[in-house]
């Protein structure tokens, strides 16, 4: 997980989930990209009951070493947003 502060303050936090690192390429999966395939598996049709940090950790644990998804938190107090249940907005 990477946390960044910006020179220009934001009104709220920003959470970015990327399918791979900047120096990597996203791979194909079965019917979707590899990241999306793992996200859907972990999400389990909405039965997943953790936060964003744990969601990304579980996705990363099942990814090949040449593709490492990333969670980036930007702005003021993004940790609160990261602790929420994904896709709950």
Image (cartoon, rainbow, N blue to C red):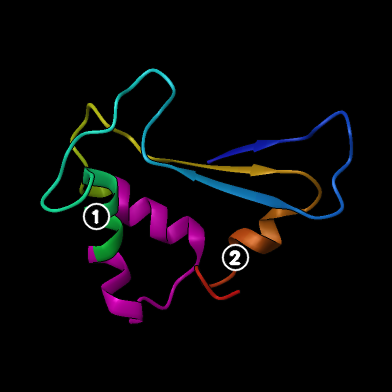
Q: Residue at x 29, y 25 (%)?
A: 25
Q: Quadrant of residue 47?
A: bottom left
Verify whether residue 49 appears in magenta.
Answer: yes
Q: Position of residue 9 (x, y in %)?
A: 89, 40
Along the line of sight, which residue is nearer the eye, 12 or 48?
Answer: 12
Judged left or right of residue 76, residue 84 is left
Farthest residue in the left direction? 30
Q: Is residue 86 above or below residue 18?
A: below
Q: Which mark is residue 83?
A: 2
Residue under the image location 87 percent in, 28 percent down: 7
* Mark 2 to mark 1 CA distance (whole Å): 20 Å
Q: Nearer the viewer, mark 2 or mark 1?
A: 1
- Tell me the element at label 1: helix
Where's residue 65, x and y in %? 21, 30
At a point 39% along the width and 17% down the height, the residue shown is: 23
What percent of the width, then of the height, locates residue 79?
67, 56
Residue 50 horizontal side relative to residue 16, left or right:
left
Magenta-colored span: 41-60
Q: Main secondary structure of the magenta part?
A: helix
- What residue did someone put label 1 on? 38
């Amino acid at each position: 997980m990477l946390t960044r502060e910006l020179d220009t303050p934001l009104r709220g936090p920003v959470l970015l989930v990327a399918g791979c690192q900047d120096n990597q390429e996203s791979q194909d999966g079965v019917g979707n990209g590899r990241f999306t395939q793992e996200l859907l598996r972990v999400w389990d049709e909405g039965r997943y009951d953790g936060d964003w940090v744990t969601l990304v950790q579980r996705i990363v644990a099942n990814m090949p070493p040449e593709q490492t998804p990333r969670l980036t938190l930007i702005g003021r107090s993004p940790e609160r947003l990261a602790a929420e249940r994904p896709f709950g907005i």
